[in-house]
Image (tube, rainbow, N blue to C red):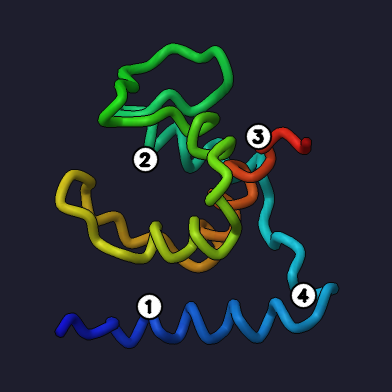
Amino acid sequence: MRLIRPRTLAALAGLALAGASPALAQTVGDPVAGRRIAEVWCANCHVIAPGGPGPATDAVPSLPAVAQRAATTELSLRVFLQTPHANMPNYQLSRTETDDLVAYILSMKQRR
């Protein structure tokens, strides 16, 4: 049985509570600051902007492609960014950096 890390559980609980209020459910963060974070931390492996240059492959999706996935939500991005992954460096983003990076990625999601 795999245990959920306390930090991940706390993030999920906080986001579930935020979802109870429409005012709190809106993305918090600055997409402009999020792009700067992506330029520093993500651009070595991911294309970070629509049509931008970079090393993205099928194994390393572009951030715009991540934004377009049906399953991509504020919650899914937060959980992903707070969970260590074998193929990604273990960046320790602050809450503000996470807010900003999530806001940037979601800013590229096309509304349908």
- Whole-angstrom CA distance, mark 4 to mark 1, is 19 Å
Does 101 appear above or below 8?
above
Q: Amino acid at mark 3?
A: Met
What residue does disc 3 label?
A: 108
Q: Amino acid at mark 1?
A: Thr
Give residue 41's mark: 2
Q: Position of residue 61 (x, y in %)?
A: 38, 30
Q: Position of residue 84 (x, y in %)?
A: 24, 61
- Whole-angstrom CA distance, mark 3 to mark 1, is 25 Å
Does 80 appear above or below 11?
above
Give residue 8's mark: 1
- Whole-angstrom CA distance, mark 2 to mark 3, is 18 Å
Q: Which mark is first along the chain, 3 or 2?
A: 2
Q: Which mark is first along the chain, 2 or 1?
A: 1
Residue 60 in the figure: left or right of residue 100: left
Disc 1 secondary structure class: helix
- Around disc 4, counting alpha carbons within 10 Å, would you say few (fewer than 14), some (14 to 19), or many (20 or more)? few
Taking the spot 68% from the left edge, 50% from the top edge, the residue there is 30
Q: Position of residue 106 (x, y in %)?
A: 64, 45
Does 101 appear above or below 26?
above
What residue does disc 4 label?
A: 24
Q: Amino acid at mark 4?
A: Leu
Q: Nearer the viewer, mark 1 or mark 2?
A: 1
- Around disc 2, counting alpha carbons within 10 Å, would you say few (fewer than 14), some (14 to 19), or many (20 or more)? some
- Around disc 1, counting alpha carbons within 10 Å, would you say few (fewer than 14), some (14 to 19), or many (20 or more)? some
Q: Which mark is first along the chain, 4 or 2?
A: 4
- Whole-angstrom CA distance, mark 3 to mark 4, is 21 Å
Q: Which mark is first along the chain, 1 or 3?
A: 1
Residue nearest the observer in this picture, 41 or 51:
51
